[in-house]
Amino acid sequence: MMRTVRPFLTVVTLLTLGCLLSCGSVRSSGDPEAMSVPQSPETAEVDPAKLKKAVFAGGCFWGVEGVFERTKGVKSARSGYAGGTAKSANYDEVSSGSTEHAEAVEVVFDPASVSYDQLLEVFFKVIHDPTELNRQGPDVGPQYRSAIFYADEEQKKAVSSFIAGLTESRLFEKPIVTQVVPLEKFYPAEDYHQDFMTKNPDHPYIVYHDVPKVEKLKKKYPALYVKE
């Protein structure tokens, strides 16, 4: 059942509702000028043949997409679904758990501007908590699991090495539970989910859960942050 959230809830109400602010609960768009949020990635022309793809899942795809869209070298980020057994995927089906898909984001990037390891750095240290199993923040369920869907053996080795390094450094107190599995199929999400942070900067979920991630990217990795 779809639920709506009014765009000007009080902080107390937001804290009380918790999961009611989950990323798929509202289809309406807000006023894109109501709040200042960094917009759009780099627009420099790049030979399409030189671009690569990577698919990440780390909770609600709104924030994952929004942070990657503001990362240097990322040409596009598209919300969708990956990792399931069903031959199709849409928000209602994925939310029911019947398809076993995760909310995911397909990132198209220029390796001459940003490396895959740098994207992993942003994913693990900015976008989400890789120690949370089948949830992220207020969003609970296997569709919000932490996962990386690798495109080839090179990406697989890079992810395995990166996670091993994080484990050895003891950056996280709890074990990393991120799935590392091959990408079988990526299903684009509905249009109202695409570019949600840019189109709905005043949405309560974006304000309280995703804007802080953009700010963290800006402060932690200023060289990777794309200014408005």
Image (cartoon, rainbow, N blue to C red):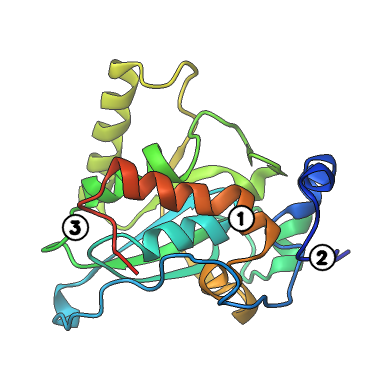
Residue sitting farthest toward the right: 1
> Which quarter of the picture shows residue 50?
bottom left
Q: Does any portion of residue 66 appear in the rendered image?
A: yes
Identify the amino acid type marked 1: Val
Q: Nearer the viewer, residue 101 or 139?
A: 139
Residue 161 in the image: x percent, y percent?
Answer: 24, 32
Residue corresponding to mark 3: 114
- Closest to the camera, between mark 2 and mark 3, is 2
Image point 16% across, 79% down: which residue? 49
Which residue in the protein does label 1 denote?
Answer: 207
Instruction: Tell me which numbered mark, 2 or 3, is placed earlier along the sequence.
Output: 2
Amino acid found under the numbered disc labelled 2: Arg
Q: Secondary structure at mark 3?
A: loop
Q: Gap between marks 2 and 3, in whole Å? A: 38 Å
Q: Is residue 97 visible?
A: no
Dot 2 alpha-carbon crowd within 10 angstroms: few under 14, some 14 to 19, many 20 or more: few
What is the C-alpha distance between the residues marked 3 and 1? Answer: 27 Å
Q: Amino acid at mark 3?
A: Val
Q: Is residue 61 above or below residue 26?
A: above
Q: Looking at the figure, which quarter contains the C terminus? A: bottom left
Q: Earlier in the sequence, mark 1 or mark 2?
A: 2
The extreme left residue here reads 112
Q: At numbered mark 1, what does the secondary structure look like: helix, strand or loop?
A: helix
- Identify whether 214 is placed above or below 107: above
In the image, what residue occupies the spot 84% across and 46% down?
A: 17
Q: Quadrant of the N terminus?
A: bottom right
Q: CA distance from mark 1 to mark 2?
A: 13 Å
**Image height of 31 relative to 225, above or below:** below
